[in-house]
Amino acid sequence: MALSGSAARRYAEALIELAADRRAVDAFRASLEQLAPVFDRVTIANLRDPSVTTRQRVEALGSALAGEPEEVRSLLILLLERDRIQLVPQIALAFGDLVDRREGIAKARVTTAVPLDEPARAELVGRLERTAGLKLRATFMVDPSLIGGAKVQVGDHLIDSSVQAKLTALGRQLAS
């Protein structure tokens, strides 16, 4: 795979190349998704503290990552040594995006006026997948200003079937 894009994407590409099989990819993804939120400003500041030797920081990080896959642990130690530890959350996102792209999964953002229960979400995603001809990984948001209906964004395509959009369109029609 050719290296391209941001530093985080390049690290993610390198990590995905190290994965021997599907189980390793899943393990790396789970590990990165679990670790990403831990690397907030405070943690990063502590890991970059110049009053603590690099060796001590590496040992502390290594022991904190004892249960993680060896490749992920090695990557994070390398990032610490190169003073790039702040990239961990972006690497986790890039890794997930790469895995999804390899599997032909597109991301969808669904915004509704009211919260949907799990069966309604599953049914909506199923309809969207059949219509789009893609597997989707959907995230759901609620925006009461939509009044009713939904907005669905898949990649750069936006489908706005909300009542708010219909009222806005009607208002434009009446004004012209």
Image (tube, helix red, strand yellow):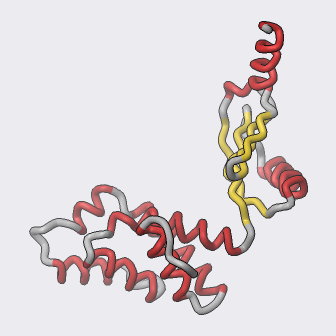
Query: Can you say whether 92 is above or below 120 in the image?
Result: below
Residue drawn at 32 percent across, 80 percent down: 77
Front residue (pair 131, 92): 131
Residue 95: x %, y % from top left: 54, 71
At 68% from the left and 74% from the top, the residue drawn is 102
Q: Position of residue 73 (x, y in %)?
A: 40, 83
Which corner quadrant holds the C terminus? top right
Q: Quadrant of residue 26?
A: bottom right
Residue plotted at (66% across, 32% down): 143
Q: Could you say where residue 22 lies in the image, as x and y percent from the top left?
A: 66, 85
Q: Nearer the viewer, residue 157 or 48?
A: 157
Front-most of residues 17 and 59: 17
Q: How many labels sit on residues?
A: 0
- Residue farthest to the left? 51
Q: Is residue 59 left or right of residue 21?
A: left
* 20 sits left or right of 75 in the view: right
Q: Is residue 5 left or right of residue 22?
A: left
Q: Is residue 173 above or below residue 19?
A: above
Above or below, 62 against 131 in this view is below
Question: In percent of the image, x 26 and y 71: which residue is there?
Answer: 83
Which quadrant holds residue 81?
bottom left
Of all residues, the one furthest to the top in this rendering is 175
